[in-house]
Image (spheres, rainbow, N blue to C red):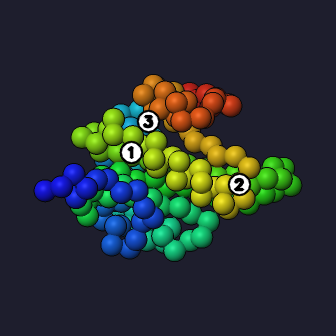
Amino acid sequence: MSDQLHEVVVRAAEHTDVEGLVACSRALFAEDAGTRDPNIDVDWPREHGPRRFADGIDDPDRLLLVADRDGEVVGHLTGVLAEASAMKPVRIATLVSMYVQPAHRGEQIGARLVREFTAWAKQKGARSVEVTAYASNTEALRFYERNGFAAKSVTLETAL
């Protein structure tokens, strides 16, 4: 088999990718939010993901990307574009979620997903892109910083 057959392709998600998007989202929730935030419903991707992803594929203000290796979704990125408002008179693109399967980390797939997202945001007229990550997820924070993001604000929380 040639190496090209096993190359990971980053592309816009299609409706046939919804199952793979849900699987990646479930893995993200289990690995990240499920270990860092007791208020997160880790079953959300299974219960609501199929419809949310299917709707997002057809929404021009949402971006759903997949990292596809031989027809298998090995990673994803979802993003959304917010319209300008009186308070913030510029369009902002938000990277909502991103996940790359552990076996495929270190292959620059995440960086490729982020580059596609920022290119889409520019094409859509966004003035900036933003992402949130758990403060305890130092690997994610380092990844985003390596890919051009810088801390702008911090959200502090206490349990009641």
Q: Position of residue 15 (x, y in %)?
A: 38, 73
Q: Are marks 2 and 3 in contact (CB under 8 Å)?
A: no
In the image, taking residue 152 as reference, residue 79 lies left or right, namely left
In the rendered image of this protein, does residue 61 appear above or below residue 100?
A: below
Q: CA distance from mark 2 to mark 3?
A: 30 Å
In the rendered image of this protein, does residue 101 appear above or below residue 2?
A: above
Single out the mark in the foreground, 2 or 1: 1
- Mark identifier at residue 58: none
Residue at mark 3: 37
Single out the mark in the foreground, 2 or 3: 2
- Residue at 33% x, 40% y is 107
Q: Position of residue 152 (x, y in %)?
A: 68, 31
In the rendered image of this protein, does residue 141 appear above or below residue 40?
A: above
Q: Amino acid at mark 3?
A: Asp
Residue at mark 2: 126
Of all residues shown, which one is farthest toward the right?
86
Location of residue 102 by image quarter: top left
Asked which secondary structure carries label 3, the reply is loop
Disc on the earlier residue, 2 or 3? 3
Residue 128 can be seen in this image: yes
Q: Are marks 1 and 3 in contact (CB under 8 Å)?
A: no
Please state which of residues 23 and 116 is positioned toward the viewer in this rendering. 116
Q: Amino acid at mark 2?
A: Ala
